[in-house]
Amino acid sequence: MVIGRRKHPTAHECRVVRRCGKQLESAVRFRAPDVKTVGAMPSRSEEPAYKQIQKAIRRRIDGGQLKPGHPVPSERELARVHKVSLMTARHALSEMAREGLVERRHGAGTFVAPPRVQFNKLLGYSEQMASLGLTAHSRVIASGVVTREHEIAARLGLAPTSRLGRLERVRMAADEPVALETCYWSADEYPRLVDAPLERVSLFGLLERECGVELAYSDEEIDATDADLRIAELLQIPRGSSLLRIRQLIFSTKSRATVYAMGLYRSGRHTLRVRRFR
Amino acid sequence: MVIGRRKHPTAHECRVVRRCGKQLESAVRFRAPDVKTVGAMPSRSEEPAYKQIQKAIRRRIDGGQLKPGHPVPSERELARVHKVSLMTARHALSEMAREGLVERRHGAGTFVAPPRVQFNKLLGYSEQMASLGLTAHSRVIASGVVTREHEIAARLGLAPTSRLGRLERVRMAADEPVALETCYWSADEYPRLVDAPLERVSLFGLLERECGVELAYSDEEIDATDADLRIAELLQIPRGSSLLRIRQLIFSTKSRATVYAMGLYRSGRHTLRVRRFR
DNA sequence: CATCGATAATGCTCTATAGCACTATTCGGA
DNA sequence: TCCGAATAGTGCTATAGAGCATTATCGATG
């Protein structure tokens, strides 16, 4: 249910104070420190105004001040408060609407969208466990560089004999083995990954934080198989047990295949959730 | 490979001629027939300029004049040709980019995106087989109405003891059994399905064509399990064989859960393809 | 031949403003 | 009391520009 109309909170505590008279100033790019730009990053070319506005709104949503169904400040109000033009405020809101964070109703206002369940969301193992409220850790079975995985190299868009980083881990949850995961990546492009402390640190995290890779999506093939002797021992299950096999080719934002991973999951311990559209 | 830079086709045959001097004119809403508005719909409140521009571009893509990789006219050019402001041309292009039809490259231009493969597409069994170039048929194992499937009724948003249509089929491809699929639906809402000739006709097709249901998406749970005696016999595989289990709750466009289906797929005969996003 | 710099075209952010379309509230009259 | 019109606030489309950031090409220089 929606909070009463015409009762938008007109006081905006959480403002992002921004520069005024931007247009005049913009020719002088070493901008005078007019007003404190709160979240100012040290990096050059400060963050766009519309993104700052988005951040401000996001903060208020995450902070619980704006709950689902609550009205978000209107375009005109955002423009006034953040001292930007209507179009800029509008840009901020429509992008957030596109992302599903916020819902726009013509003539009525913009409202915080109900918490949408994330479908088809690419998560690393630790992230998955965290989202289930579990703590995860891994046991590294093997790690090193291989050169003879022609097929996998091809999938990664590399020459057949490329040097590939390879990491094989048993994934644990609550001290029980749940899955065996093997991943591959270009050892030349990401040499640092080979020796990284991957018992505790997530591969996704390393790639995104240390290697400056932005992961975008993964194409996955899912089927069922059964455990051979080696896997049975590693996962402490009977030989021949059913396994869910997920093979994923993970792409970066530049549509570069970055990681190939194969996971074998004990049946009963892992369910993949997916939404498909007509 | 991309057509040479700075060689955008500067002659735009396919223009959507629009009104000029819109701003001045807009107060006078019974607009003088200044220039012929080609695609003008008879409906009141004519179509927005940016959508007309999109249509013009789409036509050129569909018509094959613009192939994947080819440059689309730039913002400035569209603005000039269609006699709109830069922001409007921009609006048209960025929305198309969002939809994936077109790809924008800062500093370089806007290009027709490669034909994107449909991922996470919800298909019925016969559709899946058709897309693989195979012909499919089914053997009905059981069909009728049940009233004691409380859990499934709940998933479909029905009272626990609702009458449910139930259909159990063995899915065949090339005369070999591939999967066992059981589906459930509200027998009160779709009574005609119970006696339908489902050996040959697809359930999806019946729903969409006969029952006027528009299917929208399905939420799926995927895991691995193994075959008990009955299933082993039906699928002609050894007992204990691995199976890929897909349980799907299929929703209509009105977000009404319409069908619940569970499929058990022989390992090695079926791979689910999915894309997940970060 | 290679490389570096200028150049030009592109997309991106943003201003300041106008009018339209839509929706919810409020207030006056039957 | 109920209903309809007025009203005010909202999002949507659009204008006509400015300057910035990024990219590809071409020509000059080594």
Image (cartoon, coloured by chain):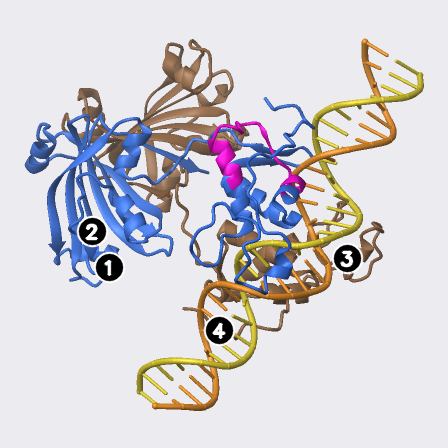
Chain colours: A blue, B brown, C yellow, D orange
Rounded to the nearest angstrom, the CA distance separating label 3 from label 1 is: 54 Å
Kindly identify which residue carries mark 4.
B5
Kindly identify which residue carries mark 1.
A189
User: Dividing the picture into quarters, in which one does residue A188 lie?
Assistant: bottom left
Rounded to the nearest angstrom, the CA distance separating label 4 from label 2 is: 38 Å
Rounded to the nearest angstrom, the CA distance separating label 4 from label 3 is: 33 Å
Rounded to the nearest angstrom, the CA distance separating label 3 from label 2 is: 58 Å
Label 1 and label 2 in one chain: yes
Question: Where is C8 relative to A68, above or below?
Answer: below
Name the amino acid, label 2: Leu
Quadrant where the C terminus of chain B sits is top left
Chain bearing mark 2: A
Rounded to the nearest angstrom, the CA distance separating label 1 from label 4 is: 30 Å
Proximity of marks 1 and 2: CB atoms separated by less than 8 Å: no
Kindly state the secondary structure of the residue where label 4 is placed.
loop
Proximity of marks 1 and 4: CB atoms separated by less than 8 Å: no
Kindly identify which residue carries mark 3.
B22
Quadrant where the N terminus of chain B sits is bottom left
From the top left corner, tell me how far across and down residue C13 is, in percent: 55, 55
